[in-house]
Image (cartoon, rainbow, N blue to C red):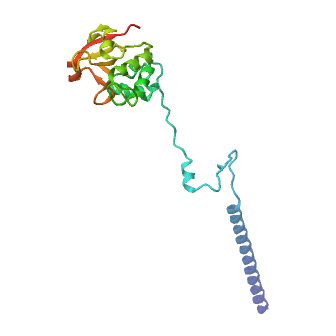
Amino acid sequence: MKNLFFVAVAIGIVSGTSTSVTAQTSVNLESVATKTSLKSSPHFIESIEITPEKVSDNMPADELVERREAPVEVVSVNRNSTSGSNIEDCTKMQFKYATMMNTEVENISNTALYNFIDEWWATRYHYGGSDKNGIDCSAFTGKLVSNIYGITLPRTAADQYKETQRVSMADLAEGDLVFFNTRGGVSHAGLYLGNGYFVHSSVNYGVTISSLTDGYYNKKFISGGRLSK
């Protein structure tokens, strides 16, 4: 009887251990399955859509970086000026001659006049000449006045002096002739532009612009000559 009791107890212990192992294994497997399910299941945020930028497969990496452009700075230009000519609208020619004559670009307004000067600029001086191979002072003033103002002048500086009305240096205006005594009597001529400057065919520099305040021309100045327009 005592032997049967020990056998029963032994069977019970083995059975209980088996049940515990089976149950523990079942619980562990369920836990692992649950964790795996949580890790593998994606979690989506509602109402969010991601659209990748379409990029060429052949575009180099450095160009991809450059596609992210910096913000563009907008610069406002005031165009409400009431002056005769806005500086932003001036031509290169206007700026060049305004700089040369130390004046405002708005004062370089006679486009035909400055185009003519620009066309003949630096043409060499040649006494008796009248073309771009060489031209003297009176031939140059004659061509300039004819082309810009439609007035025909005599050939020589002395005769041009006689055909014009006298004007003092202080009263000179654009388009007036200026006369000088360089060799005795009226022997040199030019055309006044403004701000103390005149254009002429110079013996040393050809067609150029000089200042009446220059020591040489200031001393040699005789008179201005106004054209009858």
Q: Residue furthest front?
A: 128
Find residue 113 and report its image quarter.
Answer: top left
Figure disc tally: 0
The residue at the point 45 percent across, 27 percent down is 91
Left or right of residue 77: residue 213: left
- Image quarter of the N terminus: bottom right
Residue 174 in the figure: left or right of residue 13: left
Report whether residue 198 is seen. Answer: yes
Query: Where's residue 150, x and y in %?
Result: 45, 13
Is residue 219 rendered to the left or right of residue 11? left
Pick the residue in front: 107 or 132. Answer: 132
Q: Quadrant of residue 26?
A: bottom right
Vertical arrangement, residue 161 with respect to residue 128, above or below: above
Q: Residue sitting at 38 percent across and 13 percent down?
A: 153
Question: Could you tell me which residue is drawn at 30 percent across and 30 percent down?
Answer: 205
Front position in the image: 52 or 2: 52
Where does residue 27 sit, x and y in percent of width and height?
Answer: 72, 70
**Residue 155, horizontal then vertical, whole percent:** 36, 17
Please tell me which residue lies in front, 131 or 105. 131
